[in-house]
Image (cartoon, helix red, strand yellow):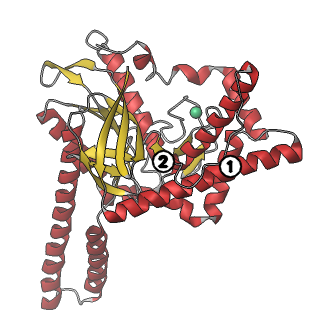
Amino acid sequence: MIKTYKFRLRPTKKQIEKLDWTLETCRTLYNSCLVDRNRHYKETCKGLSRIDQQRILVQDKKNITYLTDIHSQVLQDVLFRVEKAYKNFFRRLKDKSGKAGFPRFKLVGRYDSITYTQSGFEIIDGKLILSKIGTVKLKQNRSIKGIVKTCNIKKENNKWYVCLSVKYTKYTVYNSIVKEKIIINNHIGVDMGIKSLAVLSNGKVISNPKYLAKSEDKLIKKQKQLSKKKKGSNNRKKEVKKVAKFHKRIVNQRKDFQHKESRKIVDNYDAIGAEDLKIKNVVKNHHLAKSIHDSGWGQFLSYLKYKAEEAGKLFMKVNPRNTSKTCYKCGYIYKEMTLDIREWICPVCHTMHDRDVNAANIIDKRMLEKIRLEWPKYTLAETGSMDDIVDSNIYALKSIPSLKQEASSVRAR
Ligand SMILES: [Zn+2]
């Protein structure tokens, strides 16, 4: 069941500037996509597909740096709109229904909305957090039930609105810890990061705060100085105490930060999924292991767990296998994935993925699957169709050979 909520936005002057700039840049991109398609057709008598244009866009982003000031999904959505315009044109041509109307350039001011198609937005405490735009005040006159799928920002008569399309699937599961049924209206996957603390399936990045990094640098310096001091000297003893005190301060700073961030997640989501790190063989890679230790994954996950349990919510660990390599939309496994690939396009369903956001979505899906398997008696979709649940079954697609063949032919092209 899909429902749309429309709310008025109250962006600041600066945000309006950025929004207007984004609209204008998307309009330019839209028009240049039309130009590219027309030119390509004239030169080769072949059409240019959205997937072709996605590849061009990935290249363009390397050369045209300001494109990275727009969320990747917002850019991708422009290509979807171009594709739609062409599809509609060809349909009208086929139907011979009146004028076919070749896709036209968007004039200044005629491109009036942008869409975050999966992630990059979040609503917290009556505010809409938009990636690359900022935290925008929201006039939210009713609460949202269900899972927000897409977020469309629209300019109408110089006023700004957000349209959220929401999929409403309610799960009821039995929570064995609190020994009662709990209702899951919304759920989230948490992918623990190396540079950042974590990335969520809604696209939010929880960065480690700068003050922590600064303190850690200081600590390393202090420890180096300490090692130079003469052993057994009074001076050294004094320093040892100082360093220990400083170390304790960092530990507390990190704890504070992780408490705050885990609280936010538990307050906003009924079911929280994370990787089962015991299974993940991270210790093999020494550097990776060190940074994991430093960023305190275990501590953060334990905070999430006990806060969730206290609140009667669900915290679940899932199998971490191939979370970054599996496309969360179609289940395709991208075997060639290496650690340096941050963004990729699925060769089967052509979704553009941010590595970590995709992994978080896989974690979210695996959690839903686990809920379904572990509590089949209690799990039911009270509203919405069965498809909503089957949707979470990403395992089914993996073994269809024709899909994989298609994938390799796409890559060979
Ligand atoms: Zn895919």
Of the pair 257 and 36, the residue shown nearer to us: 36
Q: Is residue 47 left or right of residue 220?
A: right
Mark 1 or mark 2, whichever is nearer to me: 2
Q: On the rendering, which quadrant does ligand 1 occupy?
A: top right
The three-letter code of the residue at mark 2 reads Asp
Is residue 158 placed above or below 363 in the rendered structure?
below
Position of the C terminus by quadrant? top right
Seen at 55% across and 53% down, the residue is 26
Q: Residues within 10 Å of mark 2 (few under 14, many from 20)?
A: some
Image-based side of 195 in relation to 333, left or right: left
Q: Position of residue 321 (x, y in %)?
A: 47, 36
Q: Identify which residue is drawn at 70% across, 47% down.
A: 34
**Quarter holding residue 281:** top left
- Secondary structure at numbered mark 2: loop
* Mark 1 Cα shell of 10 Å, populated few (<14), some (14-19), many (≥20): many
Question: Considering the numbered disc 1 on the image, is that residue within a helix, a strand or a loop?
Answer: helix
Q: Which residue is mark 2?
A: 112
Above or below, comparing residue 171 to residue 323 in the picture: above
The percent coordinates of residue 47 (x first, y second) are 79, 38
Can you see residue 211? yes
Q: Observer-nearest residue: 103 or 162?
A: 103
**Position of residue 221 in the picture relative to residue 30 (left or right):** left
Q: Which residue is mark 1?
A: 33
Residue 94: quarter of image:
top right
Question: The disc labelled 1 sits on which kind of residue?
Answer: Cys
Q: In the image, residue 224 lies at what x, y percent?
A: 31, 82
The residue positioned 14% from the left and 80% from the top of the image is 242
Residue drawn 30% across the image and 28% down it: 146
Of the pair 249 and 202, the residue shown nearer to us: 202
Comparing 303 with 283, the one in front is 303
